[in-house]
């Protein structure tokens, strides 16, 4: 009986696609947290990962008649939207390709763009870098949407936090064990995001704008895991 249970468990683990592994989700959350801290500390005190704040500021400045300032916030919003479109194009184009998977290509794009950003000095307008990071985060969050079967976001925490306590309620109120498992996974992702933000804040102050290459190291590790673990 125990052997059957073990075999079933192994089968479930093997059936999880590489891009939905908890390890992958955690590493991508580290990148997401790092980029948030990086743009806040070094690139104008903004959060380039999520666009809710930019949309609010766009509306506020438009209401005030400050159309020039409003247009500044429109740029990262459009960059995020373009990133969504690019992510869908990549997934569609690489569905039937055998020599490379779309998940690999997404990681390659992110790695190259972040490597380029690492050369952009701080005297360059922050908007240029923040737009690129908005594009990167959009591609990432729309390419990697699940972790072991449950939806999550690797570049922001609001949805993860909501889902975490929603599943905790399912466990405490309905004794749903799957709810507890999902809750623990969300906690893990949130903690990895916090870790990434902490590392990003520390390295931004100690190293400067070149520190963004730390994300390339993480993404190369993700690419290596994809390469080694074949679905």
Image: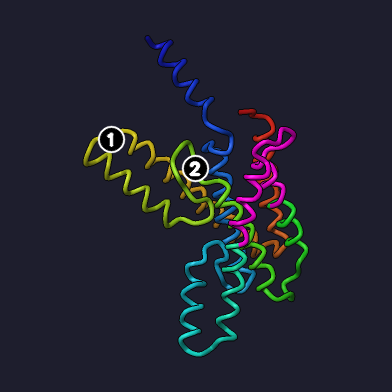
Can you give x and y, in whole percent of width and height, for residue 123 in the image? Answer: 74, 76
Which residue appears farthest toward the left when viewing the image? 173
Can you give x and y, in whole percent of width and height, for residue 31 in the image? Answer: 60, 52
Mark 1 Cα shell of 10 Å, populated few (<14), some (14-19), many (≥20):
some
Q: Is residue 85 magenta?
A: yes
Reply above or below: 2 against 74.
Answer: above
Left or right of residue 30, residue 158 in this image: left
Q: Which quadrant of the structure image shows residue 21? A: top right
Ranked by sequence position, the earlier of labels 1 and 2 is: 2
Q: Main secondary structure of the magenta part?
A: helix
Which residue appears farthest toward the bottom when viewing the image? 65
Q: Quadrant of the C terminus?
A: top right
Which residue position is annotated with label 2? 146
Q: Secondary structure at mark 1?
A: loop
Mark 2 Cα shell of 10 Å, populated few (<14), some (14-19), many (≥20):
some
Left or right of residue 104, residue 29 in this image: left
Q: Which quadrant of the structure image shows residue 26? A: top right
Residue at image x 60%, y 68%?
78
Can you give x and y, in whole percent of width and height, for residue 212 in the image? Answer: 68, 58
Residue at image x 42%, y 45%?
186
Residue at image x 67%, y 73%?
126
Colour mode? rainbow
The span picked out in magenta is: 82-109
Reply above or below: 17 against 31.
Answer: above
Can you give x and y, in whole percent of width and height, for residue 56 in the image? Answer: 46, 75
- Distance from disc 1 to disc 2, alpha carbons, whole Å, reads 20 Å
Which residue position is annotated with label 1? 176
The front one of 185 and 227 is: 227
Reply above or below: 128 against 96.
Answer: below
Q: Is residue 215 magenta?
A: no
The front one of 149 and 229 is: 149
């Amino acid at each position: 009986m125990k052997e059957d249970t073990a075999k079933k468990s192994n089968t479930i683990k093997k059936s999880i696609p590489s891009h939905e592994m908890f390890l992958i989700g955690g590493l991508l959350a580290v990148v997401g947290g790092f980029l948030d801290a990086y743009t806040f500390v070094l690139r104008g005190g903004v959060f380039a990962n999520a666009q809710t704040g930019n949309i609010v500021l766009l509306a506020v400045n438009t209401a005030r008649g400050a159309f020039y300032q409003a247009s500044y916030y429109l740029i990262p919003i459009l960059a995020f939207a373009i990133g969504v479109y690019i992510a869908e194009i990549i997934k569609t184009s690489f569905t039937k390709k055998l020599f490379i998977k779309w998940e690999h290509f997404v990681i390659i794009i992110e790695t190259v763009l972040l490597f380029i950003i690492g050369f952009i000095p701080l005297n360059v307008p922050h908007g240029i870098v923040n737009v690129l990071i908005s594009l990167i985060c959009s591609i990432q969050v729309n390419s990697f949407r699940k972790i072991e079967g449950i939806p999550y976001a690797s570049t922001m925490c609001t949805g993860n936090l909501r889902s975490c306590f929603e599943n905790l309620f399912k466990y405490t109120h309905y004794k749903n064990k799957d709810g507890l498992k999902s809750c623990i996974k969300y906690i893990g992702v949130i903690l990895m995001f916090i870790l990434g933000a902490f590392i990003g804040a520390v390295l931004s102050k100690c190293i400067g704008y070149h520190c963004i290459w730390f994300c390339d190291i993480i993404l190369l590790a993700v690419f290596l895991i994809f390469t080694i673990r074949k679905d």
